[in-house]
Structure formats: C-alpha cells, structure tokens
Image (cartoon, helix red, strand yellow):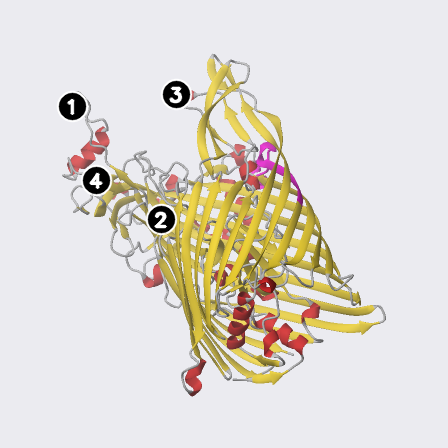
C-alpha cells in the first residue's frame, strides 16, 4: 500500500478527485447539486491512500455520512472517466439501464423510467432536438470530474425528472493546490470497420495570490473521433393467414386461404414473414469539448466562479440497406419447395417467389452544439450563513439531414430460414430466361425498374436564461441544524423546423452511379447465409449531400428537377415553437436528534414551482372543391394556432437516516417529482384534408399543447452495512406511483372548411392512466485484504436490480389488431453488474460484465407492421489494464464488447425474430501525463 503525507486541504482535494471509479457504483451524498462532499478522508489525518482502494474507501465514508442519497462515478484521474461514454459509465450504477445506438451507449433509464433530468454543475443543460435533456453521447467524458445520479432528490434540487436526476460535474481551478497540467492521447481501433481513430485531452490550471485576491484559471479541452460499423440481418413482420370462411362457405380472404391450402396448412394457424432485410451502417462520431473556468476569491468570505462549457458533436453514417419485402401485401410461397413451421404455426423455413426488392443507400447526419455560460457568487458573511447567487445562459443548435436513394428490383426466388441463431436468406434465379438472369448483383435487373430519392432536413434552436438565489443558515447546536431557502427563474424557448420527406422518382441511372456491394463472406463477420451482394447507388456519392442531388437531377422528371437541385425547404407548418417560464421557491430544514440521545437525522422541505407555457404552430387546411365536376383538393391555407397554459405544483420531500450501530444504518426517503412533456409532444401543428376519396376514414396526427406534466410520488428505503473500510453491503427498495402517463390516442374531431362539418380521426398525445414502478436493489463491494501479499490487491463488486411496472402503453396490438399487454417501454425487469478489479503497486485492472433482461423497444414499431418490438436479454464484457510508470506517467489498455455480443430483437415472442445485430469491438491504448 502506497502512502504519502500531504496537507489536510490537499487530502480533501485528492479524495474528491478519486472517489468512486468505475469499479464502484456506491451511493454518495452531495451537499448541493454542484460539488459532492470531499470530507471522505477527514478521519485519515494527513495520510491519503492512492488508487482504487482510496476511491472505494472515500466513497464509503461519504455515503455513510450523507443525508441525500446520490450514486456517483468520479474520474479516478484527470481526463479518465472509467468509460469513454457517459451513458456507458452510468450503466455500472445500480438501477440504471442503458440503450445503445450504433455500438455506443446513448440513453439511460433510472429504475425503469426514461424521464430523466440532466444537468451540468447543477444547472440546466440540453441538446436542441425537441426534447428537454442532454444527449449523453454528445459530451466528451474527458471534460468531467464525475457524474452524480439522484434517485429521490431533496427540495433544493431542480425539478424535472421523475426517473431521477443526472448531474455532470466539471473541475474548477481551486480544486487544485496550484499549477496542474494533464494530457492524454489515445488510439481507438474498431475491429469490424478496421479503422483507428484518435482521442486527446489537455487540462491546464493554475492559481495565484494577487493584490485583488486569489485568482484561478483552468482550461480543459477534449477531442474524440470514433468510428462504427453495424451489421444487421432481419426478418420482416409475421402475418397470420386468414383462413376464415363466411356464412356461404366462401373464404373471407381468398388469397390467404389459397396460400394456406397450397402449403397444406388448412385448419392450422400459419404465420408467414413478409420478407427479409440486410443493413450495414458505416459511420463516425466527432466530439469537441471545452471547459474554461475562472475563480476569484477577493476576500475570505466571497468566491466568484465564471465558467464556459461547450459541446460540439457530429454524427454521420452512410449505409447499405437491402429489403426483399412485400409490406402488408401478401407474399407468395413457392409451393414446390419444402416449408417448415414450429408447433405454434410460426414459419421456420421456406421459399417465396417474386418478392419486390428495395436497395437503399442513405446518408444521416446530426450536428449539435451547446454553449453554456454561467456565473456563480458564493458569500459567507458569517461562519453560519452562506448566500449563493447563480446566473446562466445556454444556447443549443442542432442540424440534421436524412437522404435516401432507392433502387428497385425483384427477387425471383427468396429462400429464408429463421428461428435458430442468425436468420439466413438467399436470392436465386427462377431459371426462366424470359424473366432475365435473376441475379441481384446485376445492374441490368435494377435499372429498368428505376427508383426514387427521399430528402429531409431539420433545424432546432433552444435558448434559456436562468437565475437563482439561495441561502443557508447553520445552527451551532440543537436538533435543528440548518435552514435553507431559495428562488429560481427560467425563461426558455425551443424552435424546431422539420421538413416533410420530399420524394422524387428516378429513371435508370448512368452505370457509373451504380455500385455492387459484397455481403456473403463480409457481412456479420464472414457470415455465409446471405446473398453474395447487391447493387446500390454509389455510397461515395451519397456521402455528399449536395452532390447526390446534382447527380440525380438528370434522371428525375423535368417538372421536379429544379426543386431537387434547390433541396427540400420548410413550409410554415414545419415550424414548432414553444416558450416556457418557470418561477420556483423552496425551503429545506436539516435536523439531527443526536444531542437528544436518538440516532436519527435528515431533512424535510418543499419546492413550489409555477410553469407558464406558450405554444405556436399552424393548422394546414385543405378544403374540398370540384374540378370539371369531380371532387378535388382546394387551395391550402395555413391558419395560425397559439395556445397558452400554466400550472403550479408543490413538491415536498423527506429524507431520514437511523443509525442502529456505527456500521449499520437505515435510510428512508419520500418525495414528489414531475417531468414536463417534451416540446415535440406539445407541437400543435396539424394537417387536415377534407377530400375523402373512397369514403375511408379521414386521419391525421398532432401534438397536444394542453399536456400536463407527469407526476410521481416516490418512496425509498435503504439498509446499509459497512463491515470494513473498503467493504459494504446494501439493500434498497423503492416504489413510484406515476400520474398522467402520456400515450398517443386517436379520437374523432369535427372540422368545417365551409362545406359543412366532417369528422377526422386525430391521434394526439394525451395524459392517460396512472402507473406504478416498484422494485429492489442489492449490492456490495470489498477488497480481499485477508489474502496474503500481492493477492490482497484483488477486489470485487456486484449489484442486482429488480424493477416491475404496471403502466399504460400506447394501443399495442398484433397484426390482426388484437390488443396486447406489454411492459413499460425500455424497462428490463432484471439487470446486474459483476466486476472484478486489482489494485496493487503500479498495476490497476478491471473486468466488468453488465447484463439486462429483455425489454420492450417500442409498442408499435415503424416498419414492423405496427407490432411491438422486444429486445432480447443481453450481456457485455469490458476490461481495462493500467500500468503506472511513475506519479506522472501511466499507460492504459482497454477493450469494449470483448465478448462480441449480438443484440437481438423480435416481434412479440422470440419465435418471431426481427433482427440480429453485431457491432465493433473497440481496443484502445492511452498514454497519460500529469504534473
């Protein structure tokens, strides 16, 4: 064990920097939303134990003495958050489950709820995209000193997340005794893509005594470039053959009846998939982060902190997507080929004929920039009173593009096998020369059928001004230990422009615009059960958004050519604008009955917030008219919509801790929280067309500017046993009652454009039924100090979470329209982490396994035949090894997804698979210098 003697202030600083590295996941307490307690090592005197052992020991001391439960991850070293991605780091915390996007963690749910609030240093932060939170993949992890997760917050924390609150903490110059410099450089290798990408971080900080007081300046810069490849093999939705007959004995669906008859399946339930799909996504991400902080302490009682945080994120992929798919139209079997089904009638293998093919090459881009300016004044006029004033301005901008070039062809014979492992498929000629050679790698089988081009853009801007004033008065003795109060004001606007998808039909292209892309032997790490390849529009051209339109212009109809060259634009109804102001006040009292001989302490408070919302949009109205005596669409008009609403909520909270012994304590917490609707859900825009050809049902969709927030009443209980300085076991139970879950519901609405009233079935988000979330968490961690010598460096951590939900879901149904009962979206009932680590001398190592059970991805999936889609259970192994050469230099090797884990989804039941997905394994080498 390494020890060194430093000043008490230095001890506290080091403890704060190294608390709860990735091998932890312990609950810790923050005194406020910005800076956790750093008194963990106070009982250590002047001795600080370095490394993971110190992190574990410090985290336990903080958790043990806290009055608000906070789970934390803190960078063990500067620029070294345990995982490169914030969401992936958070998955190690008990009760948190993450989603992955193209191989990286992208979104989190806390105890089964995705309504999570995000902050930086206790202030609002968001990505401008119609939502309210920060996309966790946007921020380089090197900028962060740590991440705190509040599961049952107190009244002094900002409202907004019924699932919980995630606070990202950055460093400040006064965190260091004096000059500090740190630099790191990494090379990240992505094995499926076969590419390496760089990563770097630089931190410089210093502080000086001057004639006007002490001044500190810190600059922290981070750069990441990552790559990804995702391979996907999928089956299209399964449809039940309708074999029913009418009263006259005739089939109600002659085509389905004949298909069942041809398959010798009359009288047996029979489910057929309507095709197959292949996807290969090749892309990259780029993150640039900057944090500039200035601190000034003109007197012993006043501290001024100014900070600028910038996140600049770019995401792009170009893909090859291949579909042999009939949609909702029937699929025709080759009755001469063998077919197999499982005992429930689900298709297992067989061959189909004349299946339409779409061969797509697409581009998707997103660029998000968030600029956050803040100024904080902390004044201690007496040793008992602290007054804090805080101001913030934040502006976020997001731009997106999505363009797809489509080629059409035909699969003469499609052979498909599903049910055991990865789906297999092949497309072969029917050996009829009159139909051509039937090869999907021959351009001649695509060009005559032409294709199309889809174009979409979006642009979002979010702004917020925020200010708050807080005061705390501490008492020297007695049961009442402190009183806190504060007020807060915010003024936020969100403007989103999102174009409709413009479509242009294309004729046969020039040969140099086609590309033959290989699948068999390359896709899915050499998988053989796919076609040899397919013809696509040249991906290199697709990656140039403007160049794609120029290349396609000669092949579209002359009437559309100029519109294609100009690019898609916005119409008035593409804009969605909201304004929101909040007015907040809170009061909080902390108490301790220790002086009265009763080992109970805690806090009680209430937060009252008034919210005013203004929403603006358009009703797009197309009346019916006549042309030549026939019904036709009349001129389009854009009618402005403006809605104002407000609501006031009181949010009480109570936190209690009872100490049975010095080692055993019980925590109880109760609070009420809220989550406001996303701005995209408040969008009032609606498109109503009066003409009703075929006398069908008129339909439309819209948001709902009258939505109210979701509210949750939540209770927590946690029993904690600290059996050694680096060992603890805990068990926690929780219960949440959520009111006003939002679901899309279709209702009939009446309109009149001058020709008389007519009815439209409009789907809108509505505050619906209530739900309940309950569960428990257990976990523990320890070093094996009882082992001799070098073996005492081993340690372990494990945690397990069970979450059960009873909550409404949007009308989930099978493809026959039968209602289905499904769990809350994104919620796994079971999840756990297993971690082994070693920390002795210059070597520090970690192996971590994270697992979660199946969950509902969506109740009605796009492109799934409106079926619910489930994600199968999944586990992943990550590992790292660090060798500390000396106190200034260390080398780290780490790997992500070392088990090459597949991700599988299915339609409702596992015997109806949707997709199998593989992503890169990442291997990284990092060199780090610190002075």
Secondary structure of the residue carrying tag 3 is helix
Q: Is residue 765 left or right of residue 616?
A: left
Q: CA distance from mark 2 to mark 4?
A: 21 Å
Where's residue 574, x and y in %? 58, 35
Whichever of callouts 4 and 3 sits on the residue coming sooner in the sequence is 4
**Residue that badge 3 annotates:** 694
- Cβ atoms at labels 2 and 3 below 8 Å apart: no
Q: Which residues are magenta?
A: 562-584
Q: Please report the residue visible at 37 percent of the width from the left and 40 percent of the height from the top.
A: 448
Mark 2 or 1, closer to the camera: 2
The correct choice, above or below, for 478 with respect to 880 in the image is above
Q: 10 Å neighbourhood of mark 1: few (<14), some, or many (≥20)?
A: few
Q: 10 Å neighbourhood of mark 2: few (<14), some, or many (≥20)?
A: many
**Residue that badge 4 annotates:** 270
Q: From this viewpoint, which residue is outermost toward the bottom?
A: 789
* Location of residue 616 (image quadrant): top right
Residue 522 appears in the picture as rendered: no
Mark 2 or 3, closer to the camera: 2
Where's residue 503, x and y in %? 49, 37
Query: Closest to the observer: 344 or 335?
Result: 344
**Residue that badge 2 annotates:** 870
Mark 2 or 4, closer to the camera: 2
Query: Closest to the observer: 521 or 758?
Result: 758
Whichever of callouts 2 and 1 sits on the residue coming sooner in the sequence is 1
Secondary structure of the residue carrying tag 1 is loop
């Amino acid at each position: 064990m390494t020890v060194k003697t430093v000043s008490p202030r230095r001890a506290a600083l080091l403890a704060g920097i190294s608390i709860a590295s990735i091998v932890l996941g312990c609950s810790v307490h923050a005194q406020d939303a910005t800076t956790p307690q750093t008194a963990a090592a106070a009982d250590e005197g002047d001795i600080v134990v370095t490394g993971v052992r110190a992190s574990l020991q410090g985290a336990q001391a903080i958790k043990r003495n806290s009055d608000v439960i906070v789970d934390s991850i803190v960078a063990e070293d500067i620029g070294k958050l345990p995982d490169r991605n914030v969401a992936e780091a958070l998955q190690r915390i008990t009760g948190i489950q993450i989603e992955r996007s193209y191989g990286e963690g992208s979104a989190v749910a806390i105890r089964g709820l995705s309504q999570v609030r995000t902050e930086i240093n206790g202030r609002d932060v968001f990505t401008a995209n119609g939502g309210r939170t920060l996309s966790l993949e946007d921020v380089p992890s090197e900028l962060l000193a740590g991440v705190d997760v509040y599961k049952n917050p107190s009244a002094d924390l900002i409202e907004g997340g019924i699932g919980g609150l995630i606070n990202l903490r950055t460093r400040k110059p006064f965190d260091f005794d004096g000059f500090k410099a740190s630099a790191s450089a990494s090379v990240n290798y992505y094995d499926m893509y076969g590419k390496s990408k760089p990563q770097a971080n630089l931190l410089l900080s210093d502080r000086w005594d001057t004639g006007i007081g002490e001044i500190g300046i810190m600059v922290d810069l981070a750069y990441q470039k990552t790559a990804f490849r995702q391979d996907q093999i999928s089956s299209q939705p399964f449809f039940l053959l309708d074999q029913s007959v009418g009263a006259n004995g005739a089939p109600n669906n002659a085509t389905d009846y004949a298909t069942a008859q041809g398959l010798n399946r009359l009288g047996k339930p029979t489910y057929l998939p309507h095709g197959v799909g292949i996807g290969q996504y090749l892309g990259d991400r780029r993150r640039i982060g900057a944090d500039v902080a200035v601190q000034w302490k003109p007197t012993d009682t006043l501290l001024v902190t100014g900070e600028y945080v910038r996140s600049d994120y770019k995401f792009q992929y170009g893909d090859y997507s291949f579909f042999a798919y009939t949609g909702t139209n029937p699929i025709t079997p080759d009755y001469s080929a063998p077919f197999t089904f499982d005992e429930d009638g689900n298709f297992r293998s067989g061959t189909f004929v004349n299946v339409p093919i779409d061969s797509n090459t697409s581009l998707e881009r997103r660029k998000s920039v968030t600029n956050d300016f803040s100024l904080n004044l902390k004044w201690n006029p007496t040793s008992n009173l602290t007054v804090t004033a805080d101001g913030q301005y934040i502006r976020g901008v997001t731009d997106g593009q999505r363009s797809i070039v489509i080629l059409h062809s035909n699969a003469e014979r499609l052979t498909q096998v599903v049910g055991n492992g990865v789906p297999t498929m092949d497309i072969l000629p029917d050996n009829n020369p009159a139909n051509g050679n039937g090869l999907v790698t021959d351009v001649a089988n695509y060009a005559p059928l032409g294709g199309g081009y889809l174009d979409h853009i979006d642009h979002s801007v979010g702004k917020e001004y925020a200010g708050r004033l807080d005061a705390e008065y501490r008492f020297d003795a007695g049961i009442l230990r402190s009183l806190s109060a504060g007020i807060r004001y915010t003024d936020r606007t969100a403007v989103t422009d999102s174009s409709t998808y413009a479509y242009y039909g294309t004729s046969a292209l020039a040969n140099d615009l086609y590309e033959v892309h290989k699948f068999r032997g390359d896709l899915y790490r050499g998988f053989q059960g796919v076609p040899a390849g397919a013809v696509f529009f040249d991906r290199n051209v697709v990656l140039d958004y403007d160049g794609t339109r120029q290349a396609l212009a000669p092949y579209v109809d002359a009437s559309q050519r100029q519109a294609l060259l100009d690019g898609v634009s916005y119409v008035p109804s593409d804009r969605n604008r909201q304004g929101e102001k909040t007015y907040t006040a809170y009061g909080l009292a902390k108490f301790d009955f220790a002086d009265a001989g009763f080992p109970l302490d805690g806090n009680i408070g209430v937060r009252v917030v008034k919210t005013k919302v203004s929403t603006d949009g358009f009703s797009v109205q197309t009346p019916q008219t006549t042309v030549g005596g026939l019904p036709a669409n009349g001129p389009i008009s854009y009618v402005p919509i403006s809605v104002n609403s407000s609501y006031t909520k009181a949010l009480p909270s109570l936190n209690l801790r009872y100490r049975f012994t010095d080692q055993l304590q019980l925590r109880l917490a109760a609070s009420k929280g809220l989550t406001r609707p996303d701005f995209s859900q408040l969008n009032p825009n609606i498109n109503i067309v009066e003409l009703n050809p075929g006398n069908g049902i008129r339909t439309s969709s819209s948001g709902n500017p009258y939505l109210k927030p979701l509210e949750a009443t939540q209770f927590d209980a946690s029993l904690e046993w600290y059996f050694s300085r680096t060992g603890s076991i805990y068990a926690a139970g929780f219960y949440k009652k959520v009111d006003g879950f939002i679901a899309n519901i279709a209702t009939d609405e009446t309109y009149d454009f001058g020709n008389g009233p007519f009815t439209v079935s409009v789907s809108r988000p509505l505050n619906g039924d209530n739900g309940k979330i309950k569960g428990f968490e257990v976990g523990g961690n320890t070093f094996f100090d009882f082992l001799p010598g070098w073996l005492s460096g081993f340690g372990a951590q494990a945690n397990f979470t069970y979450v059960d939900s009873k909550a409404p879901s949007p009308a989930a149904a099978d493809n026959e329209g039968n209602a289905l009962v499904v769990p809350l979206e994104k919620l796994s009932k079971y999840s756990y982490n297993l971690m082994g680590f070693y920390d002795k001398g210059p070597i520090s190592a970690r192996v971590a396994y994270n697992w979660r059970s199946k969950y509902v991805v969506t109740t009605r999936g796009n492109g799934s035949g409106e079926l619910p889609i489930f994600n199968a259970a999944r586990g992943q192994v990550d590992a790292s090894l660090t060798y500390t050469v000396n106190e200034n230099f260390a080398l780290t090797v780490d790997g992500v997804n070392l088990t090459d884990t597949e991700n599988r989804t299915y339609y409702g039941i596992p015997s109806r698979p949707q997709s199998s997905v593989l992503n890169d394994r990442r291997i990284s080498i990092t060199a780090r210098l610190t002075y």
